[in-house]
């Protein structure tokens, strides 16, 4: 199976009956670039970090509130992990099927071996979350619980954490 992106993600959401709003925009590669676009509901847009432990045995997709600083040592303690660092460009492309500038929790749908655990900031519980459809030329907003259910249906572990 190829990597699911853009329109294929929208079709998947439609087929699953998941409600969402989508907005196309110029390509953005960072959360600061996204902020500059002045999108609606920008406070609900997630920052996504793809991490691995030092032995490359465990991978984590961290979905954080965009204003939070990534404290990898604190996260390591929270999830009882070995030392964490950012996954390489090659690992990101191989496991999530996306480039480094397009990391999204929906990339997990491309992780056929289910090697990655998804950690979602508890900030997003009970509301919407804004994510890329595995391409950085659009943002979509959906209920956080719907996103978590899609990830679980894929067979991937997902949990909320306090970041």
Image: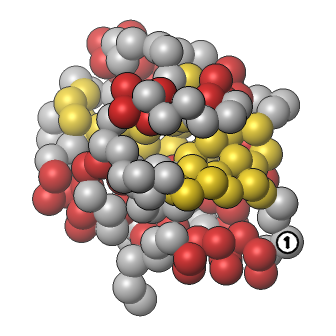
Residue 33 in view, yes or no:
yes
Q: Position of residue 118 (x, y in %)?
A: 51, 44
In the current view of this chain or complex, which residue is farthest to the bottom? 1
Front residue of 70/21: it is 21
Instruction: Identify which residue is drawn at 58% across, 72% down.
Output: 9
Front residue of 43/125: it is 43
Instruction: Identify which residue is drawn at 49% across, 35% down.
Output: 37
Q: Helix, strand or loop at disc 1? A: loop
Q: Position of residue 111 (x, y in %)?
A: 41, 67
- Quarter where residue 97 is shown: bottom left
Residue 47 in view, yes or no:
no
Front residue of 35/46: it is 35
Query: Horizontal placement of 35 versus 143: left or right?
Result: left
Image height of 161 relative to 55, above or below: above
Image quadrant holding the N terminus, namely: bottom left
**Colour scheme:** secondary structure
Crowding at label 1, few (<14), some or many (≥20) Cα neighbours within 10 Å? few
Image height of 102 relative to 86, above or below: below
In the picture of the structure, the residue carrying the numbered disc 1 is 17
Q: Position of residue 120 (x, y in %)?
A: 58, 34
Instruction: Identify which residue is drawn at 36% across, 17% down.
Output: 70
Numbered disc total: 1
- Quarter where residue 135 is shown: bottom left
Instruction: Identify which residue is drawn at 55% across, 57% down.
Output: 24
Image height of 32 relative to 112, above or below: above
Query: Horizontal placement of 117 versus 142: left or right?
Result: left
Query: Horizontal placement of 115 versus 106: left or right?
Result: left
């Amino acid at each position: 199976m190829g990597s699911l992106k853009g329109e294929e993600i929208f079709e998947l959401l439609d087929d699953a009956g998941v409600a969402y709003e989508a907005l196309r925009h110029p390509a953005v590669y960072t959360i600061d670039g996204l902020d500059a676009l002045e999108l609606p509901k920008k406070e609900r847009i997630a920052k996504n970090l793809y991490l691995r432990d030092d032995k490359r045995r465990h991978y984590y997709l961290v979905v954080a509130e965009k204003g939070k600083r990534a404290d990898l040592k604190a996260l390591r303690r929270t999830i009882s992990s070995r030392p964490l660092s950012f996954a390489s460009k090659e690992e990101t492309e191989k496991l999530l099927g996306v480039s480094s500038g397009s990391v999204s929790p929906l990339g997990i749908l491309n992780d056929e071996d289910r090697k990655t655990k998804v950690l979602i900031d508890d900030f997003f519980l009970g509301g919407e979350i804004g994510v890329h459809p595995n391409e950085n030329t659009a943002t979509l907003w959906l209920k956080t619980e719907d996103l978590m259910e899609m990830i679980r249906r894929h067979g991937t572990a997902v949990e909320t954490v306090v970041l």
